[in-house]
Amino acid sequence: MAHHPHESHGDQHAPGQGHAPGPAHGHGHGHGHGHGDGTDIDWAEMAPHLEAQAELFTPLYERALSWLGKEVTEPGLIVDVGSGPGVVSCLFAETFSGARVTAVDGSAPLLERARQRADRLGYGDRFDTLAGELPDVLTELDYPADLLWAGRSLHHLGDQRAALAAFAERLAPGGTLAIMEGGLPARFLPRDLGFGRPGLEARLDALQEEWFARMRADLPGSVEETEDWAALLGAAGLKHARTRSFLLDLPAPASDRARAYIAASLSRLRDVFGGTLGADDRAVLDRLLDPQDEAGVHRRTDVFVLAAHTVHTAVKPVQ
């Protein structure tokens, strides 16, 4: 399967800023490169970036999990669909101390990193991994989930409606399905940088939206779907749909860790869209990425991270 290079985990919908890795990364581990046309992703290669991104976004995830905890009080099994390297899986283990957590992904190397993280943090005795193609691999779960989480991963599956039905099938009666999809594009930079044409990030957003549409169209069995998540959750037989957005606000001056993430994200956007951008915007990105340039993101005092991710939940009726 071709995949969205964002992030995971984490996952805006495109190559630089914020996707959590998709659930079925095992499908086509190519590398998204070359004039913004490639839509395959080498998830194992991206592991360090995915981990750094999820760690930086931990405050956002913690707020989302706290909100979920008000609805899902004592889950026995939590399944993280499209877990990637397991940063969020381990946050689930921390937040829900009585639960078993199963990280599910198509990439065995990413699941190995998840396993190592869980062991390192002391959650290994109640942490499992499951590798395989989604959503079919979920039939291998030992028992139904009380909470099934898909964090910016559903959009990596061609038929999202069918995938949601499969997710719902694996829920215990009264169990909750939570998907993180949508939100707002991340922002790192002031609109006017003091050089180049103002509005660089808005122009990058437009390129990423086009890339995302191509990525979705390239997926096996791709089906166009109106992204009315409450309606889609209802079509999967779930009730009591709720939606809430969560903010990550890391103001300027950015920490070294935030700067490293910003630089890595802009670098990936430069790699993917360098052939599509105008020469002036390419020059601006090159200057922003130059560690020796006082106007670059490594040195300037006005860079920040501001992002919003949206979570949609619904409950499986008790028969």
Image (cartoon, grey):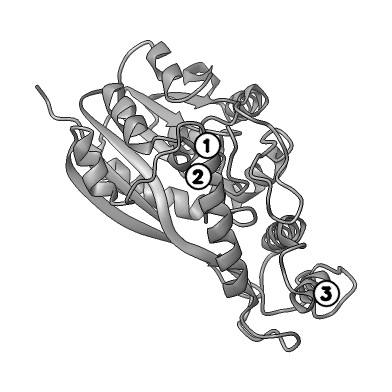
Where does residue 170 sit, x and y in percent of width and height?
A: 31, 21
State yes or no: discs 2 and 1 in contact (Cβ < 8 Å). yes
The amino acid sitting under disc 1 is Leu
Q: Residue 204: give x, y in percent of width and height.
A: 62, 68
Label 3 and label 1: CA atoms lie apart by 35 Å
State which tag comes first along the sequence, 2 or 3: 2
Is residue 286 shown to the viewer in this render?
A: yes
Q: Tell me the tag on residue 216.
A: 2
In this view, the residue farthest toward the left is 319
Q: Is residue 67 left or right of residue 104?
A: left
Q: Is residue 131 above or below residue 213?
A: above
The nearer-to-camera label among 2 and 3 is 2
| Kind of element beneath mark 1 | loop
Inter-mark Cα distance, 2 to 3: 32 Å
Q: Is residue 164 above or below residue 191?
A: above
The amino acid type of the residue labelled 2 equals Arg
Q: At x 51% / y 22%, what residue is drawn?
A: 133
Residue 307 in sight here = no
Tell me the quadrant of the picture where the C terminus can be found.
Answer: top left
Residue for badge 1: 219
Q: Residues within 10 Å of mark 1 (few under 14, many from 20)?
A: many
Most extreme residue toward the bottom is 194
Amino acid bearing label 3: Arg
| Badge 2 element | helix
Please tell me which of labels 3 and 1 falls first in the chain.
1
User: How far apart are the two marked residues, 2 and 1, measured between alpha carbons?
Assistant: 5 Å
Determine whether, in the image, residue 93 is placed left or right of residue 16. Answer: left
Disc 3 crowd rating (10 Å Cα; few below 14, some 14-19, many 20+) is some
- What numbered label is drawn on residue 287? 3
Q: Using the image as rendered, state which of residue 283 and residue 149 is in the foreground.
A: 283
Asked which quadrant contains residue 202, the reply is: bottom right
